[in-house]
Image (cartoon, rainbow, N blue to C red):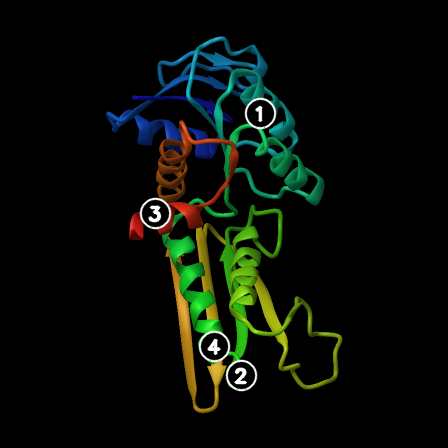
Amino acid sequence: MVRLLLNGCNGKMGRVISQCVAGRDDCKIVAGADIVTERVFGYPVYAAIGEITEEADAVIDFSHPSALKNVLDHAKEHGLSAVIATTGLDEAQKAMINKAAEVIPVFFSFNMSIGVNLMAELAKKTAGLLQHDFDIEIVEAHHNQKIDAPSGTALMLADAVSQGLSQPYHYEYDRHSQRKKRDKTEIGIHSIRGGTIVGEHEVIFAGRDEIITITHSARSKEIFAVGAVNAALFVAGKGPGLYSMGDLVKEGGE
């Protein structure tokens, strides 16, 4: 039984994770932290993660970038594995994650869906096969409350595509002010915001007289909750290092 701490437990994703864990017998949430300290799911809730005294094996953070340092500090102090599922992190915060991974196991991914990460692996391989004859575009769509654009997942997919290419490509986010033909060595990235779209991602390989697309559609937030919990079980007990959904997908395929 893996014992979990949940930072951001009363937020939208925190509640979905709590519901997900309640239906499993391989893990349990022993305590949570949130600025709203209402006790919704039975486990104790603290105003800050540093106040938690319960023993645990891993912490899942699905809160806000500003909480990252406190989460990592608590994990390092108590020897916990850390799953960082919060999006919108800047370069300094990513460096903070890399530094923490030198002393504890840290699982970090821009998207906690196994399907999206499998999509990234497929896009990487496809890019390597089609790169000389196909233009590459990425389109993502999310709900109208999402703050960042493009999404971290779109950038993750672009990075995966880039890894499959034999020469450097650049990312193109805005063509409206340009009066020129498309550059062959660019990856176009486009964002749509509207309604209650959970998450749609599409990688388009457009060639002469044929188009190949790889798509993923998220129909609920539960897929991200399941992914985060599976990540916590995967990384619990591992040695220090930086782990990702790519590692989980590869292990599942072996």
Tag 4: residue type?
Phe
Q: In terms of secondary structure, where does tag 4 sit?
A: strand
Circle on res. 71:
1
Labels in figure, total: 4
- In this rendering, the label closer to the viewer, 3 or 2: 3
Which x, y percent locates residue 149?
62, 54
Disc 3 crowd, CA 10 A, few/some/many (<14, 14-19, 20+): few
Q: Are marks 3 and 2 in contact (CB under 8 Å)?
A: no
Q: Which residue is mark 2?
A: 132
Q: Gap between marks 2 and 4, in whole Å? A: 11 Å
Q: Position of residue 72 (x, y in %)?
A: 59, 26
Marks 2 and 1, the one that precedes in the sequence: 1
Q: Distance between the Cα atoms at labels 1 and 3? A: 27 Å
Residue at which label 4 appears? 205
Earlier residue among tags 3 and 4: 4
Name the element at disc 2. loop
Residue at screen point 43% across, 50% down: 246
Front of the two marks 1 and 3: 3
43 lies above or below 111 = above
Disc 3: which residue? 251
Left or right side of 20 for 215: right
